[in-house]
Image (cartoon, rainbow, N blue to C red):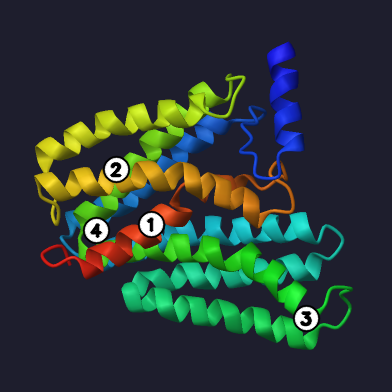
Amino acid sequence: MRRAQARHARWANNRLAVPYPTDGPKITFGVLWFAMLIGAVLLGSYFDDPAIASVAVAGVAAPVGGLAGLQTGNAWFPNLPATRAWTAAAAYLTGLAGFYGPWGVVVGIALGVIVLLFYLVSYRGHRRSASQLFDVLFRSAIPVGIAVASLSALASVGIGAQVSLILLVSAYEAGDFIVGSGAANAFEGPLAGMVAMGAVTFLLFLVQPAPFDSSSILLFALLAAICCPLGQILASGLLPRGNAWAPALRRLDSYLLAAPIWLLLILQVPGLS
């Protein structure tokens, strides 16, 4: 009981806290999320068509991104349903555009920003200034949309890269939640997640999925191990408070930095793209 009280106090008092709520079927949803992502990738692999993998992952992840935009918008604007509907639409469109590959990510960002600007111009009822309102709208929708779009677009540079990132992030999230949900401090969960990632990294090192070789898969796995906990902290920064209710955002928080950085680096490193 004392450990639980200490955890909740830490989440309430820390602006960038990463909470581990255990109410509801969290593990069931986590397993279902993993199965749907892997199933989408395997569909593209079965047809040997990266475009199918991109479309399938976008179809699975973009609705979750839209829900994350809705919940984040609701955390900022609990009494304005119209506002959170627009942040949901912007997040969904940004994420969905990733089916078109790296350029789709750019197009998705443009679409999301246009949607938010249209709402900003058309609605005058907010007390915030235009710049303050756009800041909140942007953080509610665009970062999570970029994460979803980047994850979808990874198939265009190699289905192996896409499935590798999903396996690494899923291993991190499993270890992080199982240990972190019962830990009295903020470090045990991420450390457990990194240990789980180490086991997956060893398997990927043996398999060496394209476009990686033995050296690059270790470097990209290390990068993912750094980005996953930082992505969780970034998700807290996107919310008005770290323990705000936004389970869909928390489902995607480990991808917030890992997916776009992986995509950008694979495109830039000769021999990988």
Question: In terms of sequence position, does the residue under pointer 2 or pointer 4 come before the other?
Answer: 4
Per the image, the residue denoted by label 3 is 130
Question: In terms of sequence position, does the residue under pointer 4 or pointer 1 come before the other?
Answer: 4
- Left or right relative to 177: residue 58: left
Give the Cα distance between marks 2 and 1: 13 Å
- In the rendered image, the vertical position of residue 15 relative to residue 45, given as above or below: above
Question: In terms of sequence position, does the residue under pointer 3 or pointer 4 come before the other?
Answer: 4
Mark 2, mark 4: which one is toward the viewer? 2
Per the image, the residue denoted by label 2 is 222
Q: Quadrant of the N terminus?
A: top right
Three-letter amino acid code at the position of disc 4? Gly
Secondary structure of the residue carrying tag 2 is: helix
How packed is label 3: few (under 14 Cα within 10 Å), some, or many (20 or more)?
few
Residue 110 % position (x, y): 51, 82
Mark 4, mark 1: which one is toward the viewer? 1
Per the image, the residue denoted by label 1 is 259
Q: Quadrant of residue 151?
A: bottom left
How packed is label 2: few (under 14 Cα within 10 Å), some, or many (20 or more)?
some
Report the residue at 44% width, 44% height from top: 228
Image mark for residue 236: none
How packed is label 4: few (under 14 Cα within 10 Å), some, or many (20 or more)?
many
Image mark for residue 44: 4
Depth order, front residue of 3/106: 3
Three-letter amino acid code at the position of disc 2? Leu
Give the Cα distance between marks 2 and 4: 26 Å
Question: In terms of sequence position, does the residue under pointer 2 or pointer 3 come before the other?
Answer: 3
- In the rendered image, the vertical position of residue 102 relative to residue 255, given as above or below: below
Question: In terms of sequence position, does the residue under pointer 1 or pointer 3 come before the other?
Answer: 3
Three-letter amino acid code at the position of disc 3? Ala
Secondary structure of the residue carrying tag 3 is: helix
Three-letter amino acid code at the position of disc 1? Ala
